[in-house]
Amino acid sequence: MKLNRKDILKALETISVAGEGNNMVESGAVQNVMTFDDEVVVDLVLATPALHIKKRAEVDVMKVIHEKVYEKAKVKVNIKVQATEKKKPEIKGKAIPGIKNIIAVASGKGGVGKSTVTANLAVTLSKMGFKVGILDADIYGPSAPIMFDVEAERPLSVNVDGKSKMKPVENYGVKILSIGFFTKPGQAVVWRGPMAAKALNQMIFDADWGELDFMLVDLPPGTGDIHLSIMQSLPITGSVIVSTPQNVALADAKKGVAMFQQESINVPVLGIIENMAYFTPEELPENKYYIFGQEGAKNLSDDLKVPFLGEIPLVQSLRESGDIGRPAALQTATPLESSFEEITRNMVQETVNRNKNLPPTEAIKITTMAGCSAVNKK
């Protein structure tokens, strides 16, 4: 069958590049279409170098031609990345000397275990040999001091180059700063947005974080003042979204992804983590009960075309370990340890991919996964 170029273009008008509104032809992504009998070559120019977006564009082009033009067509897709001034990935905020990667952990909805996941990601990164810090940015509900058993601790004042700085509290190899260190137990933080933002800036820039491979920022639920303040203050390397499989949680997780993908924010989404994926009783470790639904977050990641980092079971010891201040990732030879190791490795790999495919910045220094260690670029 001899293919017609007009038919190919008409088919391509029904799909778009991930994250863009116009179809591929209107947006200018399709630069050229050439046909030779049953063969077609499509040249695409994309504004983003993200691997998953390039792969998705290639798959979508092949699929739509096979479905709408000729199912046996031999399709070749050539992709060139040419970031425009408008679409060029923008690293916002003032870099903190010594901090290589800043990962925002968000959920959109409260109660999905975001802080628990953040704590265990941090501990797992530390076990892998990375230097890690946590900024507990949940001003109104700080939980890091409890989860790391440092409620009674207070940051010390140290002199750095003639300036007084806060020294983060440290436990399990993780440096921590939280508004919880500066309030009394049971005291409510009743602050307006500007005051909360000022407190965050002090914990970010008036602290002696030292050398960190990863700073994890535990964001509060929602998409409001705190999130914008963090993204305006820091050059965020990427974001991680935590959700349960439940539809109510997924709806808010979707909004969380949309917030980071807004053109004015444009923070790469490294992936989605599914927490409380299924319940496993201790006495029946092989049994799985999908209390909140099955693979909801995984399906959402497919729909939004962002990586799926892994799932975490609903296990009683996970809750107990957080309450006593010893994150579950510190356990050895348990399913929870394995889950967090897999998720953390995936997150690190996505960070590596992101750093390879976006323009380098002072905040980006991580290289490869070899030996699970961060290597400085010379």
Image: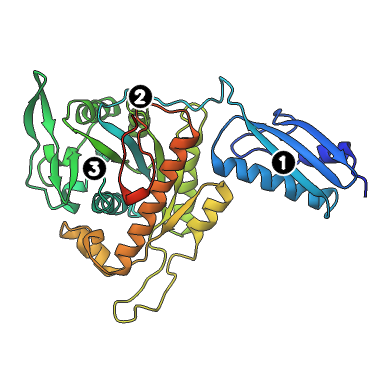
Mark 2 = which residue?
93
- Relative to 125, does residue 362 appear above or below in the rendering? above
Q: State the separation of the CA atoms marked 1 and 3.
A: 41 Å
- Relative to 134, does residue 127 appear above or below in the rendering? below
- Relative to 294, does residue 242 appear above or below in the rendering? above
Q: Which residue is drawn at 33% across and 64% down?
A: 338
Q: Earlier in the sequence, mark 3 or mark 2?
A: 2
Q: Which residue is drawn at 40% across and 41% down?
A: 239
Q: What residue type is labelled 1?
A: Val
Q: Which residue is drawn at 24% across and 25% down?
A: 198
Q: What residue type is labelled 3?
A: Lys
Q: Is residue 123 visible?
A: yes
Of the two numbered discs 3 and 2 in the rendering, the one whose residue sits closer to the viewer: 3
Q: Which of marks 1 and 3 is nearer the N terminus?
A: 1
Q: Where is residue 229 in the image (x, y as percent from the top left)?
A: 33, 28
How many other residues sit within 10 Å of disc 3, few (<14), some (14-19) or many (≥20)? many
Mark 1 = which residue?
77
Q: State the separation of the CA atoms marked 2 and 1.
A: 37 Å
Q: Position of residue 161 (x, y in %)?
A: 11, 19
